[in-house]
Image (cartoon, rainbow, N blue to C red):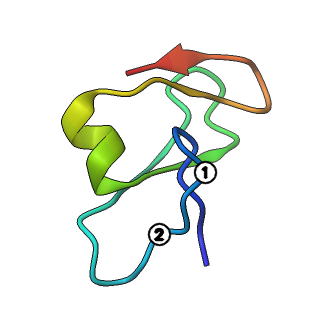
Amino acid sequence: MPTCLGCGAKITPDEKWAKFECPNCGQITIWRCEKCRIFGREYKCPKCGFVGP
């Protein structure tokens, strides 16, 4: 089960999540839960350190 990079919560299939490649390095898949997306919480790429909203 994927984990949100913003808060560390497990992402469930019934949730409105987002999944995309890191905008900087493109090597890591970023998963964000619905709450982190709504509140614009930051995430950090574990590969390159890119921080995004």
Would residue 40 appear left or right of 22 to someone viewing this image?
left
Helix, strand or loop at label 1? It is loop
Residue labelled with disc 1: 8
Q: How far from the left and from the top, in percent, is residue 11? A: 47, 69
- Contact flag, marks 2 and 1 (Cβ < 8 Å): no
Q: Nearer the viewer, residue 37 or 48?
A: 37
Count the marks: how many? 2
How many C-alpha atoms fall within 10 Å of the one at disc 2: few (<14), some, or many (≥20)? some
Q: Nearer the viewer, residue 44 or 26?
A: 44
Q: How far from the left and from the top, in percent, is residue 32? A: 43, 49
Q: Nearer the viewer, residue 17 or 22?
A: 17
Residue labelled with disc 2: 11
Q: How far from the left and from the top, in percent, is residue 8? A: 61, 51
Q: Amino acid at mark 2?
A: Ile
18 is higher (above) or lower (below) than 22: below
The C terminus sits in image quarter? top left
x 27%, y 83%: residue: 14
x 60%, y 61%: residue: 3
33 is higher (above) or lower (below) than 53: below
Q: How far from the left and from the top, in percent, is residue 49? A: 72, 17
Q: Which mark is residue 35?
A: none
x 23%, y 65%: residue: 16
Q: Amino acid at mark 1?
A: Gly
Would residue 16 appear left or right of 28 to someone viewing this image?
left
- Which residue of the protein is positioned furthest toward the right in this rendering? 47
Would residue 37 appear left or right of 4 to someone viewing this image?
left
x 56%, y 34%: residue: 22
Q: Within the image, what quadrant is residue 25 found in?
A: top right
Helix, strand or loop at label 2? It is loop
The N terminus sits in image quarter? bottom right
18 is higher (above) or lower (below) than 49: below
Q: For marks 2 and 1, give the CA distance.
A: 9 Å
